[in-house]
Every structure is written in structure tokens, then in C-alpha cells.
Amino acid sequence: MRSVRLLAEPRCGDLQDIFDELGRGASYGASTTHLGKLLPRIEGGGGGGCPVLVLGISRLCYVEDE
């Protein structure tokens, strides 16, 4: 039996807003490295039955230099 356990809110798409503000949004578009695309693949068995550790970087991790 497959079990997916989320320990935190999976949506980290808010980081894209920071990239857009920095003028780098086009370099970091939606891909499988974004949690919104990655989680459905894992939940669908994309890990092949192996344990998968997924970390997401959110806006809270960004500190702007002054």
C-alpha cells in the first residue's frame, strides 16, 4: 500500500513571484521541480515504490539584501 504523508503545506508557487520581481521569472517557469507539478507525480506512484523526500523552498526562505 502506498502512503503519501505531507508534513507541511505543499504549495511553494509563491517563490515564482519573487523571481518575477527580480526580472528572472522566465528563467524559472513551471516545471517538474515545482511542487505543484511534482506532488501529483509522486502521489501517482512516480517514485516507483521507493521512499522520496521532497523539500520545497517558500517565500519565507528569501531574505533580500539591503
Image (spheres, helix red, strand yellow):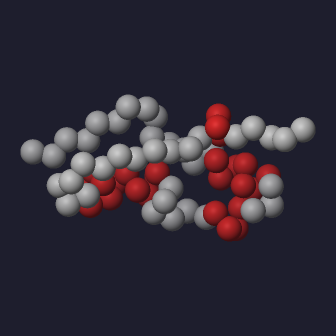
Rendering coords of residue 2 (x, y %)? 15, 46
Rendering coords of residue 25 (x, y %)? 71, 61
In-image side of 4 versus 19 (left or right):
left
Residue farthest to the top, as pictured = 7
In-image side of 21 versus 53 (left or right):
right
Quarter of the figure with residue 49: bottom left
Rendered-image quadrant of the N terminus: top left
Rendering coords of residue 53 (x, y %)? 35, 46
The answer, for residue 45, to whether it is visible in the render is no
Residue 39 vertical position relative to residue 62 in the rendered view, above or below: below
Image point (40%, 56%), residue name: 38
Residue farthest to the left, as pictured = 1
Residue farthest to the bottom, as pictured = 27
Quarter of the figure with residue 60: top right
Image point (65%, 52%), residue name: 16
Image point (35%, 36%), residue name: 6
**Looking at the image, which is closer to me, 51 or 2?**
51
In-image side of 19 versus 45 (left or right):
right
Rendered-image quadrant of the C terminus: top right
In-image side of 23 versus 61 (left or right):
right
**Looking at the image, which is closer to me, 13 or 48?**
48
The answer, for residue 23, to whether it is visible in the render is yes
Count the numbered circles shown. 0
